[in-house]
Amino acid sequence: MTLLAQILRVPGPQSPSVAMEARALCLLVLVLASVPSGRAEEYLGLSANQCAVPAKDRVDCGYPEVTPEQCNSRGCCFDSSIPQVPWCFKPLQETECTF
């Protein structure tokens, strides 16, 4: 029996509606677990600190209708949570302290 079949199988004697609700709940959990989070992909290859650029300091790195993937492939950060500022912008440069 496959893992999915085991998850969707409701053991014990239950009414058909209870079994259907359990299956629907399991299916919903599986669907939600498989949907990628947008925030997790916004900084591919960059640290969250590098992309913590205040809105007023963002330097545009994209073009109209740029996708998060296209922006990241240019080495830039993508954050569409603030309107009226660049959503694709240059990251902060991490500096190393040398003594």
Image (spheres, rainbow, N blue to C red):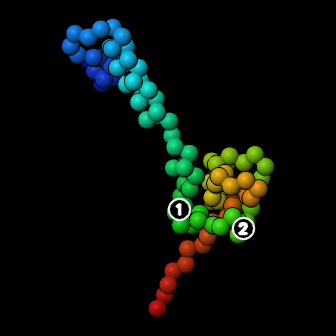
Q: Are marks 2 and 1 in contact (CB under 8 Å)?
A: no
Left or right: 22 as drawn, with respect to 89: left
Q: Amino acid at mark 1?
A: Ala
User: Which of 47 and 85 lies nearest the eye of the viewer?
Assistant: 85
User: Which of 23 and 70 lies nearest the eye of the viewer?
Assistant: 23
Q: Nearer the viewer, mark 2 or mark 1?
A: 2
Q: Quadrant of residue 24?
A: top left
Residue shown at 51% from the left, 40% from the top: 36
Element under label 2?
A: helix
Q: Amino acid at mark 2?
A: Lys
Tell me if residue 91 comes above or below residue 67 in the rendering: below
Badge 2 crowding class, 10 Å Cα cut-off, few under 14, some 14 to 19, many 20 or more, is few
Q: What is the C-alpha distance between the residues marked 2 and 1?
A: 18 Å
Residue 98, x across and y down, in percent? 49, 87
Task: Examine the rendering and report whether any part of residue 79 can be seen.
Answer: yes
Residue 51, x across and y down, in percent? 59, 63
Residue that label 1 marks: 48
Q: Quadrant of residue 6?
A: top left
Tell me if residue 2 comes above or below residue 47 in the rendering: above
User: Which of 96 and 51 lies nearest the eye of the viewer?
Assistant: 51
Q: Earlier in the sequence, mark 2 or mark 1?
A: 1
Q: Quadrant of the N terminus?
A: top left
Left or right: 16 as drawn, with respect to 86: left
Task: Examine the rendering and report whether any part of residue 5 can be seen.
Answer: no
Residue shown at 76% from the left, 56% from the top: 84
Q: Quadrant of residue 23?
A: top left
Element under label 1?
A: loop
User: Which of 49 and 63 lies nearest the eye of the viewer?
Assistant: 49
Residue shown at 64% from the left, 59% from the top: 76
Q: Which mark is residue 56?
A: 2
Residue 83, x across and y down, in percent? 73, 53
